[in-house]
């Protein structure tokens, strides 16, 4: 599947008429930059040409919110008398920066195709078998309509993919389309048993109920002495440390890159509690349901 995926990249990139990324402002029409919604900056721009009758698509992006998520607005333009005029816009079509099961970015500017009266957008996650969302827009009678919207979702770990047609708006119009992009929750925990010395890092659960069921059924909690050291529903690092008596301590961070911070935190928690010979047992970091190296 990886080979097929890379081949698709090449085909789509070759089909792109003209792609300009933010960072090269002299090549971007001033009216496109000026059309950025308040609080956003231009992330990507692509056009079928620069003359009267050409079509352009621009994606604008917000700054990260409190959870580090950047949100996007898609605007489609039509060139009239040498100027690009906004014709349709939506903030629900381009994925946010953490809108996949792995909390990665499904949007890449090179997967926007723009041609006369048509815009096609593909968005992928980074799975071994990439989940794919594809949406077509067509200009008919002076308005932009959703032609087709599909999603193929491969759950991590394999299985049969979910293939679905995304519901189209009653009006059929681009500005009323909901791409159903959300940041999927991901629940994770550490359980430890000081009696048996066993412990478990539990991750990849979409609901708190799924996580609790896994905790209750884990081999660590099959006998008395099981303790839930940590639960969290956001990305970050979890670390487990033990003292010389085998007592376990856990610490979490909210930064999935803060592995050292989590490790030191668990050891410090052990020491503060009066433990001796405190040592790290294991540290894991997650981004969505993916465990990072």
Image: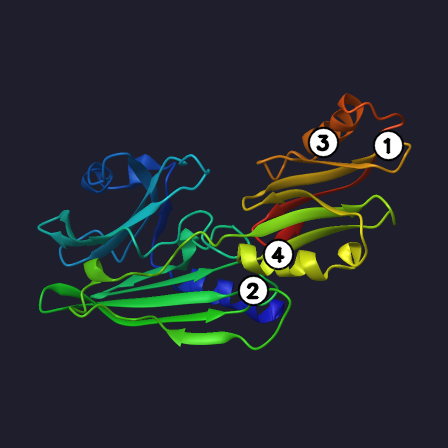
Closest to the camera, between mark 2 and mark 1, is 1
Query: What SS does tag 2 mark?
Result: helix
Describe the colour scheme in one phrase: rainbow
Rendered location of residue 89, percent (x, y): 21, 53
Residue under the image location 39 percent in, 53 percent down: 95
Does label 4 or label 2 sit earlier along the sequence?
Answer: 2
Q: Is residue 293 visible?
A: no
Residue 243 image label? 1
Rendered location of residue 109, percent (x, y): 40, 52
Which residue is disc 2 drawn over? 6
Quadrant position of residue 3: bottom right
Does label 4 or label 1 sit earlier along the sequence?
Answer: 4
Query: What SS does tag 4 mark?
Result: helix
Q: CA distance from mark 2 to mark 3?
A: 34 Å
Does label 1 or label 3 sit earlier along the sequence?
Answer: 1
Does label 2 or label 3 sit earlier along the sequence?
Answer: 2
User: Are discs 4 and 1 less than 8 Å apart at CB?
Assistant: no
Q: CA distance from mark 4 to mark 2?
A: 39 Å
Q: Is residue 2 left or right of residue 197?
A: left
How packed mark 3 is, by other alpha carbons closer than 10 Å (few <14, some 14-19, many 20 or more), is few
Rendered location of residue 165, percent (x, y): 36, 75
Which residue is disc 3 drawn over? 260
Closest to the camera, between mark 4 and mark 3, is 4
Residue 212 image label? 4
Rendered location of residue 188, percent (x, y): 62, 49
Q: Tell me: residue 159, above or below residue 279.
A: below
Does label 2 or label 1 sit earlier along the sequence?
Answer: 2
Q: CA distance from mark 2 to mark 1?
A: 48 Å
Q: Is residue 184 left or right of residue 187?
A: left
Q: Is residue 242 visible?
A: yes
Most foreground residue, 266 or 257: 266
């Amino acid at each position: 599947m990886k080979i097929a995926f890379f081949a698709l990249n090449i085909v789509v990139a070759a089909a792109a008429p003209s792609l300009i990324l933010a960072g090269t402002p002299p090549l971007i029409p001033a009216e496109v930059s000026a059309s950025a919604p308040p609080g956003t900056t231009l992330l990507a721009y692509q056009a079928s040409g620069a003359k009267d009758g050409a079509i352009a698509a621009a994606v604008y992006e917000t700054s990260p919110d409190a959870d580090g998520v950047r949100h996007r607005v898609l605007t489609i333009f039509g060139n009239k008398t040498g100027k690009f005029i906004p014709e349709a816009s939506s903030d629900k079509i381009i994925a946010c920066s953490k809108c996949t099961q792995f909390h990665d970015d499904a949007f890449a500017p090179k997967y926007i195709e723009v041609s006369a009266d048509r815009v096609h957008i593909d968005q992928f996650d980074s799975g071994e078998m990439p989940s794919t969302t594809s949406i077509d827009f067509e200009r008919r009678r002076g308005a932009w309509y959703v032609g087709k919207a599909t999603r193929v979702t491969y759950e991590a770990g394999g299985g049969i993919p979910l293939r679905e047609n995304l519901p189209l708006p009653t009006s059929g119009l681009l500005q009323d389309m909901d791409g159903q992009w959300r940041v999927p929750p991901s629940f994770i925990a550490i359980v430890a048993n000081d009696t048996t010395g066993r412990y478990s890092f539990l991750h990849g659960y979409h609901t708190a109920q799924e996580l609790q069921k896994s905790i209750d059924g884990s081999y660590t909690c099959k006998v008395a002495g099981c303790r839930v050291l940590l639960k969290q529903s956001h990305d970050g690092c979890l670390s487990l440390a033990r003292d010389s008596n085998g007592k376990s301590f856990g610490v979490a961070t909210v930064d999935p890159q803060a592995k050292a911070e989590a490790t030191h935190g668990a050891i410090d928690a052990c020491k503060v509690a009066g433990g001796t010979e405190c040592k790290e047992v294991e540290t894991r970091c997650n981004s969505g349901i993916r465990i990072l190296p």
